[in-house]
Image (spheres, grey):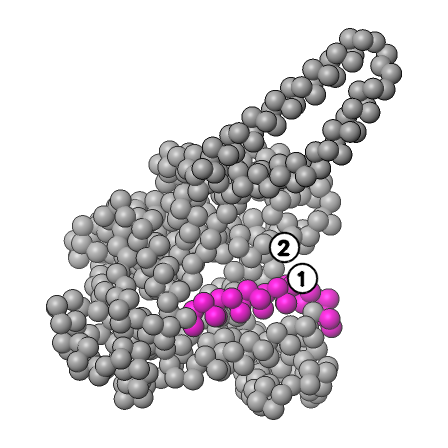
Amino acid sequence: MIEALRLAGRDAARLREIGRVASRFGVDMLMTRLGLSDGGTPREETYSDDLPRRTRLALEALGPTYVKLGQILATRTDLLAPEWIAELEHLHSSAPKLDFEDLRPAVEQAIGQPVEQAFASFDPVPLAAASMAQVHRAVLHDGTQVVLKIRRPGVRALMEADLRLIARLASVVEAASADARRFAPRAMVRQLAEAVLEELDFTTEGRNADRMRADFSDDPRVVVPAIHWELSSEALLVMDYVEGTPPRDAAVLRAAGIDPAAIAALGADIVLDMVLVNGRFHGDPHPGNLLCLTGDRIALLDLGMIGHVSPLRREEFVSFVQALSTGDAALLAEVLSRWSLHGDVPPERIEEAAEQLIRRQGGGPLVLAAIVSDFMALMRREGMAMPPDLLLIFKALVTIDGVLTAIEPGFDLSAAMRRASGRIALARLSPEHWMPIVRALTWELARIGDDAPRLVRALVRRLEEPRPTEAVTLRRGSALVAGSVFVGSLLVATAILLR
């Protein structure tokens, strides 16, 4: 199967490297199952007990593109068993720290001057290092403490080559393996490419930070580091340095003068506002990307991965929570049918799955992790696959739920939902929520307008047909007039709104 790829020389060399890594970590059987083995006997019998862990280690060894692929797979709780999800969630993109002199040319090219002139002081010892970037601290001439996120030299070319190879592999796998087709490999690769290209361009993260800061501009408890655009570029991001305590341990927070209960409540408010009010949320809100500050505030860091929630998805998620809270199995089944990517699941099976979820999780406190775990198990059993954007929402919610529960045991998200209900209702009345609907209606009315002469002729012919009674004719004529008035009113209202 692998011969059919016809790879260019450099991509073929990378494929051979993948084979060597697969062999080193004993994941040859995965290559064989996917039709990507060049031969040989897989060693599944020797290693079967810890295959998920070895797969995670192999992905880390292959570098940032494959780490990102594993992180996307970690969202597929509708397809993968819990032991695979748990292991893939441990993926981290680590790398040896580079000497700053290896990074200096790229930094000075980006800022247009020597580092010593641009900053009052600069620490050449890295604060952190990952496979895509390295972070250093510095101080601006006005005394502002900042951090520099510097893209590693050569990482873009490597990741673009990996994307080419993965795209070709996805086509082979989707054609060869019925099991793999459930994952929609080519669609997953498109999602991977979008995520990788966004994260490679640090200006995307900067814009995300600016938007998120604007979303919470009225709440001083939410801190998003300011971006110094005069020093930033595609390969370099300079932002304010924020010092705080990660939300991992309640005792550590209390020792720092921070109230864990207040942080848990604020964290829930933030994530619900992001998902259900603002329509823009942190895609990976784990403790390393959150800091608790004095005054019971939260800082949001590392905004390279941002998810977007359409007004329709917001409505669906509210209906999902409402159905669980009230025990409405019919409403839940309606939501599940919308969320299934495959329309071949019989309605009665969707209704049965909804009733089971209501029996197990409905009517009580909203323990999100338990609900989602049970929900995804039902989806896997019924062969239902969910849209990727929805899975990212659930993953973000479950992640923040785990963070909040760790510092405030017994935390119930339903109280936060009640607090957010007023803000959600106001968001539904905002122009941002309704304008897409109005625009769609306008285009539809314009399309109908183009067909108006034909429709009028058809209606006239219909009215001229013999009627059983004059009363029926009068009723139908009245309905036509009423319909014309209604359409005219919509056109006028739309024109006013668009102005």
Question: Mark 1 = which residue?
Answer: 182
Rendered residue at 51%/66% (across/down): 194
Q: How many numbered dots are placed on residues in this image?
A: 2
Residue 185, image x, y percentages: 63, 67
Quadrant position of residue 428: top left
Judge whether residue 408 can be spotted in this image: no
* Of pointers 2 and 1, the one earlier in the residue sequence: 1
Q: Amino acid at mark 1?
A: Arg
Question: In front: 200, or 299?
Answer: 200
Q: Is residue 124 above or below residue 325?
A: below
Question: In front: 377, or 305?
Answer: 305
Residue 344, image x, y percentages: 73, 50
Question: Mark 2 = which residue?
Answer: 385
Rendered residue at 41%/37% (across/down): 430
Does the CB distance between marks 2 and 1 fall below 8 Å? yes
| Side of 253 relative to 305 (left or right) | left
Judge whether residue 271 can be spotted in this image: yes
| Side of 5 relative to 497 (left or right) | right
Residue 8, image x, y percentages: 62, 88
Magenta stretch: give its range. Answer: 175-200
Crowding at mark 2 (Cα within 10 Å: few <14, some 14-19, many 20+): many
Residue 37, image x, y percentages: 68, 83
